[in-house]
Image: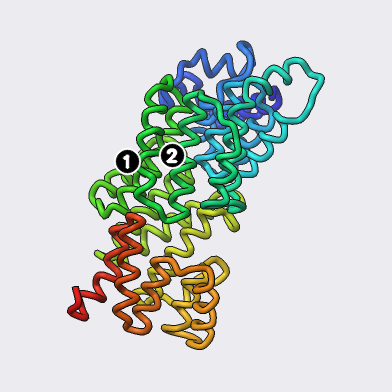
């Protein structure tokens, strides 16, 4: 840690930057920064260090490298909690994995053992979160693991748990079921002391709320929530990327080109972090973009076929490619049970109003009123609604 502080201090001096001026610009006391750099009062607070790094280094990759270096060396309970919170909202899922491993391994070091005991309850929740982050477990599979895991009644742990439960219900396309978990998450966040961890959790909560508003077809409220996240001074890359994607989805029926602009911005945000490919969010953004292109028939050559779902691939094949292959995929999907989207894809391909009704019923049952417009439009056009 001393070498890292020395590197940061040397950079400040080499750039002829005044600690007093930096302190004023990032709204942190000069004494706090000076003591942290000299390790006079122990390890610098993670949130102070993060602000310093983003202020001093303009290269995003250098910022990431410096923050990772701090996290690798941090050793106080509070800094570990802040590092976990940061890593979740910044998309540093491998860093979460590394923290879980470092603070779970058996040790004879008494100081380390004390920190391990302090952070154990938080690690258990982030371990659950990383199942979804890394696209290993989703939906019911994730819910099963959550229900088998004992989670602390601590407000921070419960706020995390309820945002994760919202995500699992989202995976299952049970959008209306997210509301009760949203209320619980909000209540637990309100109980927490103001500070960095609370800010991180509030952003995660707002991210989930934006999607509940989207599926409830409350597009104006959804856009306001997305802009609140995007305009935040906090450097939460993944949450901001998600807000861009959600904002894009809110324009799908109103302005497809505007939708494309924001979803591409979401993908771009993720590509600025480490190893986005293979993560749940990256695949989700790419699938949403593919749906937009297929549904409205533009930029089809820009579809990333490595990331899209089987349903979207079948839809593409039937409309623009090998129709027989598309139907073969649909037959496989029927064996598992078609989703509301897949029912819509078939009803559009075959002009099947009965399938359109089933799709509409399924969308309404899950609480996705915005996407219920898809089969509803077909039924209205055919004069049966």
Q: Is 351 drawn above or below residue 246 in the view shown?
A: below
Element at badge 2?
Answer: helix
**Label 1, residues with CA under 10 Å away: few <14, some 14-19, many ≥20:** some
Quick check: 348 left or right of 9?
A: left
Residue 63, visible in the rendered structure: no
The residue drawn where x is 40% and y is 38% is 181
Question: Front-most of 352 and 225?
Answer: 352
* Mark 1 or mark 2, earlier in chain: 2
Q: Quadrant of residue 68?
A: top right
Q: In the image as oriented, which residue stretches furthest toward the right?
A: 108
User: Percent x, y for residue 256?
Assistant: 31, 67
In the picture shown, does residue 379 fall above or below 213?
A: below
Q: Residue at x 58, y 29 (%)?
A: 122
Identify residue for label 1.
Answer: 228
Query: Which residue is the site of mark 2?
Result: 204
* Alpha carbons under labels 1 and 2: distance apart: 12 Å
Above/below status of 195 relative to 379:
above
- Badge 1 marks a residue whose secondary structure is helix
> Closer to us: mark 1 or mark 2?
2
- Comparing 206 with 92, the one in front is 206
Instruction: Look at the image and tell me whether residue 56 can be seen.
Output: yes
Q: Quadrant of the C terminus?
A: bottom left
Where residue 206 appears, as percent x and y from the top left, is 37, 40
In the picture provided, is 136 more to the left or to the right than 374? right
Contact between labelled residues 2 and 1, with CB atoms less than 8 Å apart: no
Say which residue appears at 60% left-offset and 36% top-offset.
Answer: 149
């Amino acid at each position: 840690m001393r070498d890292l502080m020395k590197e940061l201090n040397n950079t400040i001096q080499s750039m002829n930057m005044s600690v007093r001026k930096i302190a004023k610009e990032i709204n942190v006391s000069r004494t706090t920064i000076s003591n942290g750099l000299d390790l006079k009062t122990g390890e610098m607070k993670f949130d102070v260090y993060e602000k310093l790094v983003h202020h001093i280094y303009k290269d995003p990759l250098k910022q990431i490298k410096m923050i990772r270096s701090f996290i690798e060396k941090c050793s106080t309970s509070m800094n570990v909690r802040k590092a976990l919170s940061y890593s979740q909202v910044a998309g540093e899922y491998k860093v979460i994995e590394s923290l879980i491993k470092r603070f779970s391994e058996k040790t004879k070091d008494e100081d380390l053992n004390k920190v391990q005991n302090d952070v154990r309850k938080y690690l258990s929740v982030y371990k659950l979160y990383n199942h979804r982050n890394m696209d290993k477990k989703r939906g019911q599979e994730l819910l099963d693991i959550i229900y088998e895991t004992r989670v602390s009644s601590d407000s921070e742990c419960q706020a995390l748990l309820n945002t994760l439960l919202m995500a699992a219900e989202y995976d299952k396309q049970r959008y209306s079921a997210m509301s009760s978990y949203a209320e619980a998450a909000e209540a637990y966040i309100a109980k927490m002391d103001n500070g960095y961890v609370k800010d991180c959790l509030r952003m995660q909560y707002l991210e989930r709320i934006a999607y509940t508003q989207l599926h409830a077809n409350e597009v104006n409220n959804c856009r306001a929530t997305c802009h609140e996240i995007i305009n935040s001074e906090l450097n939460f890359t993944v949450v901001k990327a998600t807000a861009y994607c959600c904002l894009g989805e809110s324009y799908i029926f109103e302005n497809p080109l505007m939708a494309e602009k924001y979803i591409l911005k979401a993908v771009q945000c993720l590509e600025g972090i480490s190893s986005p490919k293979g993560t749940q969010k990256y695949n989700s953004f790419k699938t949403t973009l593919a749906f937009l292109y297929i549904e409205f028939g533009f930029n089809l050559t820009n579809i990333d076929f490595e990331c899209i779902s089987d349903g979207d691939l079948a839809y593409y094949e039937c409309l623009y490619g090998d129709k027989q292959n598309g139907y073969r995929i649909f037959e496989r999907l029927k064996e598992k049970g078609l989703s509301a989207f897949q029912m819509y894809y078939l009803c559009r391909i075959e002009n099947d109003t009965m399938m359109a009704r089933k799709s509409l019923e399924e969308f309404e049952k899950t609480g996705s009123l915005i996407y219920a417009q898809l089969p509803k439009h077909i039924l209205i056009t055919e004069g049966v609604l």
